[in-house]
Image: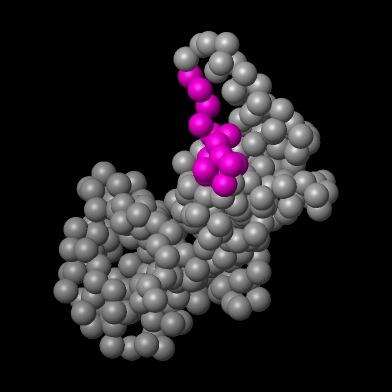
Amino acid sequence: MARRSLLTGEERRRLFEPPTSDREIATRYTLSLEKLDWIEERRRPANKLGAAVQLALVRHPGFGWTGSQTVAPTLLKFIAEQIHVPPEAMSLYGARVPTRSAHHAAILARLGLRPFSRTDLRLAIAIAADAARSTDKGGPIVEAVMTQLRRQGVALPSPDTIERVSLAGRAQARRQSAVDLLASLSEAQLAALDQLLVNDQQLGKSALAWLRDLPETPSALNMGALMERLDYVRAIGLPPKIAEAIHERRFDQYVREGAIAPAFLLGGYSVGRRRATVAAQLLDLERRI
């Protein structure tokens, strides 16, 4: 089964790949005198250029050079011209893995970073979960992981690892938001939320579908229908304050999902997500009625 995609193609290019425009390349990859001096310590042209490219790509987007990665000609030429080495020298750099590894380690040390390890997975997932408290969008979550790891002195793992921990963090945030939203509800209230998705023979549809079907035109008959729905919602007794237990944007997302997802689709959600979505929908219906 294919892994769920977290990022769009454009987001993946923006976050994980070097820029391609001349202006962005100049902004990101102009080498300071200090860095030029460090690069000049290498004797061979290939090592100078390879170290310079590694340094540039560790700084942005943050992953260094893998050896199999193709460096865009425009970027390679820009870096090579600064150190007065022909771009073709890069083809000789990839042959010596120990040299590449030594350069990479030296660059991390210069930048005050340590390699990402398995023990950092929990940290990365926690960062992702915190970012996902207010959004399901992959771009902001991944960006938060990358930014916070660097701030804490941790070199970035592979893009694949970053996406995986971001997905795990988002799933964790979703579960926790449902727990927090439902925490104060009684067993009877939770059972009432479940019952809303069951088809009611008298209504000819689920109670949730009936509640959503709000009459729009003003009339005495429609006012009666609205009051009937309001009484039904209030009988379940969800306190409006439970919405304050989670981030406003997360609550709004539950409301949006609850407004459009049919009962059979909601029935396929996990128990916590299903109940949280229905609860948010009820609170929104009560407010609108």
Figure quadrant of the C terminus? top right
Check if residue 212 falls in the magenta segment: yes
Outermost residue, front direction?
202
Measured as percent of width and height from the top left, residue 213 is found at 51, 31
Residue 162 visible somewhere in the drawing:
no
Q: Is residue 157 above or below residue 126?
A: below
Residue drawn where x is 55% and y is 36% of the image: 210
Taking depth in this image into account, of 24 and 244 the one nearest to the observer is 244
Q: Is residue 122 above or below residue 237?
A: below
Q: Which residues are magenta?
A: 201-216
Q: Is residue 229 above or below residue 138?
A: above
Residue 230 visible somewhere in the drawing:
yes
Q: Would residue 248 be found to the left or right of residue 204 on screen? A: right
Q: Is residue 108 above or below residue 253?
A: below
Residue drawn where x is 57% and y is 11% of the image: 220
Q: Would residue 165 be found to the left or right of residue 138 on screen? A: right
Taking depth in this image into account, of 178 and 247 the one nearest to the observer is 178
Check if residue 78 falls in the magenta segment: no
Q: Would residue 82 be found to the left or right of residue 73 on screen? A: right
The answer to which quarter of the image holds residue 222 is top right
Taking depth in this image into account, of 265 and 219 the one nearest to the observer is 219
Taking depth in this image into account, of 19 and 241 the one nearest to the observer is 241
Residue drawn where x is 29% and y is 74% of the image: 69
